[in-house]
């Protein structure tokens, strides 16, 4: 069963990666970098500060910081312990991929997926009652994570698991913040 799943994973990546063309390479190389998204991060911070009291904004910022520290640790520990080669470093598939970058660390699970979905979902949890447009933020992690397959550095399962980890972490840290703030708001 696991072998069949991994075979599907490779075939799906090969298909998706080979949809790419040189005319879009620079776009996806830009999309995949965190600095590209700094204006979005600043907008999130602005919206959080604008829609919450100063005291609440500080608590929210701490929940983002602690969540990102937790997600980063989970990514590092999982990659080192699982040790799944990136597609571009795997001899069984790298000859049929369009590889535009060549990171040397491991693939499972995607740090880009986990971090982007955790930030987006935590933003949604805090802002969904304040702005109906906040759900548009999901475009970011979708583009961000697809770029990883386009570049040949992650398998679809890496993306899927990373996305789920990010969503679950966002939910956990939102609920923890809600529980911790209740005693202080009475």
Image (cartoon, grey):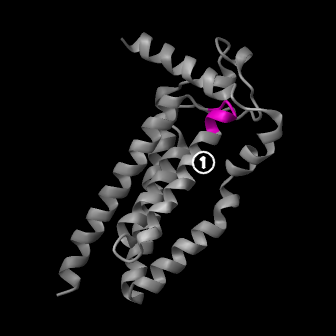
Q: Is residue 59 above or below residue 186?
A: above
Q: Is residue 19 visible?
A: yes
Q: Front-most of 27 and 2?
A: 27
The quarter of the picture where the N terminus appears is: top left
Q: Is residue 148 above or below residue 18?
A: below
Q: Is residue 177 above or below residue 51?
A: above
- Residue under label 1: 144
- State the residue at coordinates (40%, 72%): 127
Judge the density around disc 1: few (<14), some (14-19), many (≥20) Cα neighbours within 10 Å: many
Q: What x and y, as percent, mark residue 11? A: 56, 17
Determine whether the residue tagged by mark 1 lies in a helix, strand or loop: helix
Residue 152 on the magenta segment: yes
Horizontal relation, residue 102 to residue 40: left or right: right
Q: Is residue 86 visible?
A: no
- Residue ranking furthest to the right: 23
Q: Front-most of 180 and 18?
A: 18
Q: What x and y, as percent, mark residue 178? A: 25, 70
- State the residue at coordinates (67%, 30%): 152
Q: Is residue 171 above or below residue 38?
A: above
- State the residue at coordinates (40%, 44%): 165
Q: What x and y, as percent, mark residue 55? A: 38, 87
Q: What x and y, as percent, mark residue 120? A: 47, 59
The residue stretch that appears in magenta = 148-153
The picture quadrant where one finds residue 128 is bottom left
Q: Front-most of 124 and 173?
A: 124
């Amino acid at each position: 069963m696991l072998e069949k799943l991994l075979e599907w994973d490779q075939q799906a990546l090969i298909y998706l990666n080979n949809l790419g063309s040189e005319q879009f390479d620079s776009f996806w190389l830009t999309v995949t970098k965190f600095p590209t998204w700094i204006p979005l991060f600043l907008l999130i911070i602005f919206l959080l500060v604008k829609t919450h009291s100063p005291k609440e904004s500080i608590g929210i910022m701490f929940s983002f910081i602690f969540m990102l520290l937790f997600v980063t640790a989970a990514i590092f520990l999982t990659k080192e312990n699982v040790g799944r080669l990136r597609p571009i470093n795997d001899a069984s598939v790298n000859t049929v991929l369009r590889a535009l970058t060549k990171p040397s660390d491991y693939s499972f699970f995607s740090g880009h997926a986990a971090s982007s979905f955790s930030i987006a979902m935590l933003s949604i949890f805090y802002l969904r009652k304040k702005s109906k447009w906040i759900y548009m933020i999901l475009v970011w992690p979708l583009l961000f994570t697809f770029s990883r397959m386009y570049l040949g550095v992650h398998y679809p399962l890496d993306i899927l698991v990373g996305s789920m980890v990010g969503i679950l972490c966002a939910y956990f840290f939102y609920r923890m913040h809600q529980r911790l703030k209740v005693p202080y708001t009475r």
